[in-house]
Image (tube, grey):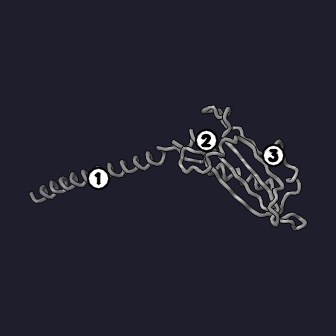
Amino acid sequence: MKKLNLIKNKKGGDRIISVYWFAILFIVAAAMVYLVVSFYGKPYDVRELEANALTNKIADCFSKGGYFVDSALQISDETFLDECGLNFQTENVYDWNVQKQFYVEVSVEGFNSENQLINIASGNLNLKDFCNEEEDNFPLCLKRSFYSVDKENNQYKINILTIVRKTEKNVQ
């Protein structure tokens, strides 16, 4: 008879543990669903990454290994995209092909003199008007400056302004 009571108590203990087990499983599953929805619920804004990549590509076009590229002084507005290997074409959504989504402005000036040797602009000039705005629904502006020297030890300051719009897809 004592053996029978032990078995009953053992079964009752298993029932209580199984209720807690299902409660813990439910809490863990709910937390995982919440984390996935909060992570993937909004699109990731990659405009800053695009602007940085574009700025680095332009910087490589004007300076390689810390030395100013001699042929960079012959780059004009018309030849800029081809010389630097850039392509401002975007996917055909939200009429992005009609309204350009990028703007780039590059100026090169002598380090000791403030006269500009090169002033290049390409892309949608209207985007430049929104550079002082801090909200998410405006284009992202990125300004970078760096110094470079040529083989004759002439020093140059290179200023790059990169603007990426793409607000319909990246900001919601």
User: Crowding near pointer 2: few (<14 within 10 Å), some, many (20+)?
Assistant: many
Question: Which amino acid does the dot numbered 2 rest on?
Answer: Lys
Residue situated in front as seen by the camera: 122 or 27: 122
Label whose residue precedes the other's in the sequence (2 or 3): 3
Residue situated in front as seen by the camera: 6 or 77: 77
Question: Which amino acid does the dot numbered 3 rest on?
Answer: Phe
Cβ atoms at labels 1 and 2 below 8 Å apart: no
- What residue is at 17 percent from the left and 55 percent from the top? 7
Q: Position of residue 128 (x, y in %)?
A: 66, 46
Q: Position of residue 105 (x, y in %)?
A: 73, 49
Secondary structure beneath dot 3 equals: helix
Instruction: Name the quadrant containing residue 127.
Output: top right
- What residue is at 80 percent from the left and 48 percent from the top? 84
- What residue is at 45 percent from the left and 47 percent from the top? 36
Label 2, on which residue?
A: 166
Can residue 63 be seen in the rendering of this structure?
no
The image quadrant where one finds the N terminus is: bottom left
- How many discs appear? 3
Comparing marks 1 and 2, which lies closer to the viewer?
2
Tell me if 166 is positioned left or right of 14 in this view: right
Residue lying farthest to the left in this orientation: 1
Residue situated in front as seen by the camera: 44 or 119: 119
Q: Position of residue 55 (x, y in %)?
A: 71, 53
Label 3, on which residue?
A: 80
- What residue is at 19 percent from the left and 53 percent from the top? 11
CA distance separating discs 3 and 1: 65 Å
Residue lying farthest to the right in this orientation: 152
Tell me if 138 is positioned left or right of 76 in this view: left
Label whose residue precedes the other's in the sequence (3 or 1): 1
Give residue 21's mark.
1
